[in-house]
Image (spheres, rainbow, N blue to C red):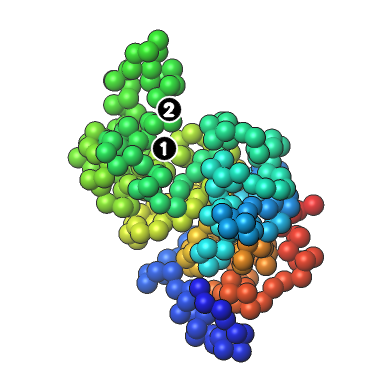
Amino acid sequence: MGVYNVSDVSEQDISNLMVGRDVILNIEKTPASSGKPVIQVKDLMILCDTGKPCINHISFTLREGEILGVAGVEGNGQSELVEALCGLRKYNAGSIQICKTEIKKLSISHIRGLAVSHIPEDRMTTGVAPNLSIVENILSDKISDHKFSKHGFINKKKIKQYGLEMVKQYQILCKNPDVRIDSLSGGNIQKAVLARELSNQPKVIIADQPTRGVDVGATEFIHKRLIAMRDEGKAVLLISSDLNEVIGLADSIVVFHEGQIVAYFPDTSKITELQLGGYMLGIHKQSSNEIKEVIHG
């Protein structure tokens, strides 16, 4: 991203910069029914390798039964936040509590044990093992479950049944669940990632660019699944650079710019892509009192 002078940036510049995809999807959902806090981030700071803050003292709360969107031009701290929430990166100051448990000293497996699911930004690098089958990828975090293995012996029959069930439930187009996952289209690989992450009965779902590089059909499927999880009372943190997606799918939005939250919109139905774009570029910034509303007391 270059440096922008406010007087040099037109509405058309913002509009051109913020285009997410050619096809604009109409996302249907009922109003959220928010519950108790599930993630509480307080005064969080993360330093980059250069020593400068990637995340600069941010605070927010994610509650049950809501989708909180994180909007921002890529490279403004979103990835570092996701890594900290999932235990992939240590943070330098502040606090992250998930289900009232401070996670700073917890391992990745312990954080997942708090019923946290993660749909990663890059499915081929961190989302799947490309050389393994569909069912092996879906079961990668469940293989020690007594349902699939006991006394060191794997129950191949139950694994096959589970694979067929997941392929059907998540509409994964394939010859059978035993084919290599990298033989599938991007949309079907992403559905397999969802099958693994959403079948864990999560309380928290961190969805990082969940529809990037997938077709319209897969995008609609993913949106419906995330909304269904929200309606079941799950908490969803949605990170997306597609403004049509983040406005349409999220119930509320925080905007990141240079590692800080510069705006909070509690009702996405009242904002436009153009308005959001001005905050993403740092042209506008809300007052501290407006931003603090995302802490929810």
Q: Residue furthest bottom?
A: 7
Hey, what amino acid is under mark 2?
Answer: Lys
Q: Which residue is mark 1?
A: 196
Q: Which residue is mark 2?
A: 142
Residue positioned 59% across, 52% down in the render: 81
Q: Secondary structure at mark 2?
A: loop
Q: Position of residue 261 (x, y in %)?
A: 67, 63
Counting residues from the N terminus, which is met first, the one under dot 2 or under dot 1? 2
Hey, what amino acid is under mark 1?
Answer: Arg
Q: Is residue 190 above or below residue 258?
A: above
User: Badges 2 and 1: C-beta atoms under 8 Å apart?
Assistant: yes
What is the total number of numbered labels drawn onto the structure image?
2
34 to the left or right of 297: left
Q: CA distance from mark 2 to mark 1?
A: 9 Å
Q: Secondary structure at mark 1?
A: helix
Residue positioned 40% across, 24% down in the render: 143
Q: Position of residue 235 (x, y in %)?
A: 60, 46
Residue positioned 44% across, 69% down in the render: 20
Q: Nearer the viewer, residue 287 or 249?
A: 287
Q: Nearer the viewer, residue 141 or 89?
A: 89
Q: Residues within 10 Å of mark 1 (few under 14, many from 20)?
A: many
Is residue 169 in view from this perspective? yes
Q: Position of residue 212 (x, y in %)?
A: 40, 58
Q: Position of residue 275 (x, y in %)?
A: 60, 76
Q: Quadrant of residue 257?
A: bottom right
11 to the left or right of 159: right
